Image (spheres, grey):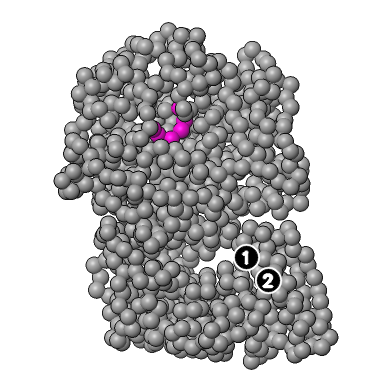
Amino acid sequence: MMNNHPVGFDMTLGTPLSWPRIVEHLQYIKAHGIDQFIALYHRVRGRERDQLRWGDEIKYTIVKFDDEHKKVRVSLRAKDLLDALMASEDVNRSLGEENRSLWRPEFAAYMVEGTPGTPYGGLMSCFNIVEYNMRLRYDDVSALLRPNESLLSISFPALGAPDFTDPPAVPRPTHPDSVGRSVFYPDEAIYSGHPRFHNLVRNIRGRRCEKVAINVPVFRDKNTPSPFIETFEDAEASRAALPDHIYMDHMGFGMGLCCLQMTFHAVNEMEARWLYDQLTSITPIMVALSAATPIFRSYLSDVDSRWPIISASVDDRTPFERGFVPSASDGYSKFNAIPKSRYDSTDCYIYPCSVQYNDIQLQYDEQLYQRLIAGSVDEHLARHIAHMFIRDPLQVFEERIVQDDQKSTEHFETIQSSNWMNMRFKPPPPDDPNIGWRVEFRPTEVQLTHFENAAYCCFLVLLTRMIVSNRLTFLIPISLVTENMQRAVRRDAISTQKLYFRKTLAYLHTPEGKPCPEGRPPAEPEPEPYGNNVAEISIDEIVNGNTDFPGLVPLMLQFLNSADVNAYTRCTINQYLSFIQKRARGEIWTTAKWMRKFVHQHQTYEKDSHVPDECIYDMMKKMDSISRGEHCEKLLGDFKKKTEQTELTRLLLSINPKRWICNDIMYDLFRLLDRPQLGLKLALFSPRFNALVNKHFNGKAELTIWRTITICKDIGRSKPELLVHGKSEGFPLPDHLLHDKIRFNDLQIWYIDDSVITFLRANQQIWNRSGTKLELDIEENPQIWDAFSREIWPIFEQNIRHLSFSNGHYLDNLRRRTSPTFFTDLTQLDSIDSEYLLPDSIADDGPNATAGQALSKWLNTPTKDGQPKQLSCYDLSESPNIHWIINFKKVFFDANTSSASYIIRIGFFESTEIEPFEFINERTNEMLTFTAEEDNRWVLKRCQIGETIQWEDKISDNLNNIKFELYDDCIGPLSSPKAGQNNAKDPLEMNAGPSEEQKKK
């Protein structure tokens, strides 16, 4: 990123050398590669104060759907598309016009790589256009596709399966001209527009002295053969394939997968080294959060990430380097038992204060290390470079062996760019004064939607800014980063794995206890017993915090509170960060989990770990629809793409609503007309226009505010503002009734103080007339709950038609502060979404009742109009809660009097053990039915015999939809006396302890 040719995919033309020819020049190339780095380093080491910029690279797969045979294949048309895309770039460049995107080839003939036309700047407002630019890139390629072709930001799950390419191509494992000699992956699937890619495949196989051997554990399902063993006619494949593993044998199985990579510009060399180290410990977290690759060669695996597959796919270590033989006979292997592939996690930190965490024996070329030291490169960076140079170059052009080391860095880059580690430290190029010191974040899996990819990008950018600004350190021993990477790729790692991470927050300090100066760190690191500050914690705790560690996202929110961020940008950022938080909690599924669930529920899957063609076809069709805009709640929750919202009138922001609605209706009606046409239209129309508007408001019509409206308090503002999604500036919060004929489709309240309460009370007519859907997402903070229960709850309690919350703590807080029977006191409430709280079989709302019992009491209390109560909830346990179902049956059979009618829609994580039923209680003249819906959803109904009741979606069309999202820093001055004091400490204080409420938890 940040240049026209992504590092590692050099577009230089020439005659590529075969591996035996490269061996003849190895020592020359390595020695001159070091000399080139030394020369470059001395030219750029003093470079300072570069602009903070960043960018992303997204790899896409081109697929073609065969609707007749229900099969999907990769389309080998990348070169055709790239010829058109890059020609357009050249035309724009010659005309002096800016390219909005740049396109480059990738390893496979079915892949393209897209980046923004220019890097994003250091302003926070850049976050508002990231998703938009990703959409533009997608549209640029989609416009060139043929019928039945689609562009997907996914790794194709059927690579290597029979007939997986279009046009068809057949592997030739025994043919002497075959590049990869693969049993599964044909040469035609390699990008043909440049010899680099074919030559890499050939030279990795040549250096290794055999084909690569990729063995990924197979997922063991109910009917998976035990042991799972594949048979091959190819002798090498038969030797290399392991039992209970999916075997692959070609570089394309790794380099043919897609990913999301990011590059960050630093102000100088030392900041780049600091970021390199800090982000290294973050890489396993992003691997787990972005898990999106569970299927290989059409088999379900026991990993969710491409990382171990791509690592093995370019593993060029010889048998001696892998420790299989005691001595080397090839003439070029110098290091015995190199523990990792050249594509793996980094083995050392490079910032001077970080070296105490380098706890593994680093292999490096001693001779080249001394050459670097003699060239005045410090020992920490010298070890890093010399460690990379234990690898040999894989791509050498005959015409470019002899170079001017003072001007060229090609020999250095040919080794640097083929060390594919989770982080890459990148010095400025010698020929572009606009590019400075950079670090590249490499392990993130690409996501299916632009929203998800933008969210991950913004999360990482904010993380870098927070680390640099606050000098935070997240370092752990480098050996534990390796262990974390191995855990992060496992199936459903977010829910099942704990990673090593810092227990508490820390800052970078000198031995004297002072912060390290900018640019030049102290000569010696601070001694610290780091083992005492590292623990195994869940990804949820890393992202969202626990009693000891504040959490990455809360730290970012704290950082944002001190930054210059306008309300519109803050709204964008909060949306992305909230999405990351929910995915870390497991509330929103990873792509890998979604794919697994799709396969398990497909009618063609036989629970034998093999994914049939029709299942993959249907899954890719669904993924294509989602990538085009279809909302998937499992993958996105309530979040939708930023560009989806419609235009909103400024009615609610004006003292004279009628005047503003006139203006906005005029704008929407006439925005496509030029000024003379607009004048003519208004001359004819205006006599009736005001009458029409007045009739609209004075009649029965209701104006729905479809746009997202947010009440929040921006930094530097004395009072909260009302923010209209899509508008760059916030507006003062009105203290009067806006208009009694409007309804809010999405009102989000992130801050409360006297002015917010005044606004809510002033508009009581709106909440009473339409009714309210209330969604609660409130921190466990006594001060906030006291204020909410005392000041806000009374405004809504008599107009709440639907209530949404995530667990029983919310009910306990309200029952404790209002009344134990508050649930049954809500006379209008007929629908609840309790998410992870299941109703108890015992109905009780007494003072000692549990939240589940209180929920059941509400469920069994009849409504005034006799309509059935509706409850939606989830059971996320690995196996269904059969006892919960049994208890409901027992209560039904034991009943002597009829209950209220109700419908419970419940989603199960796994529903294979559940059976539908229908029972009748003649004493009460009632029936109880349990039936299956789609996607592991079931419906439990209790009603009178012969009565027909159906689930009705009452909550979206005619209610005010209001969400309170309140955290520790979201409460301001209140005129009423405070019931308690907020003792929470600043999370940026390293020694801050937990609050009293957290201690109780």
Q: Relative to the observer, which residue lies in front, 912 or 35?
A: 912
In the picture, which quadrant includes the C terminus? bottom left
Asked if 831 appears above or below 41 in the picture, the reply is below
| Residue 340: x %, y % from top left | 47, 28
1 and 2 marks in contact (CB < 8 Å): yes
In the picture, which quadrant includes the N terminus? top left
Q: Amino acid at mark 1?
A: Asp
Asked if 136 appears above or below 571 in the picture, the reply is above
Q: CA distance from mark 1 to mark 2?
A: 10 Å
Residue at 20%, 37% (x, y): give it: 524
Residue at 70%, 51% (x, y): give it: 600
According to the image, label 2 marks what residue? 884
User: What main secondary structure does the magenta stretch of the protein show?
Assistant: loop
Q: Relative to the observer, which residue lies in front, 464 or 240?
A: 240
Q: Relative to the observer, which residue lies in front, 239 or 946?
A: 239
According to the image, label 1 marks what residue? 875
How crowded pointer 2 is (Cα within 10 Å; few <14, some 14-19, many 20+) is rated as few
Classify residue 972 by image quadrant.
bottom left
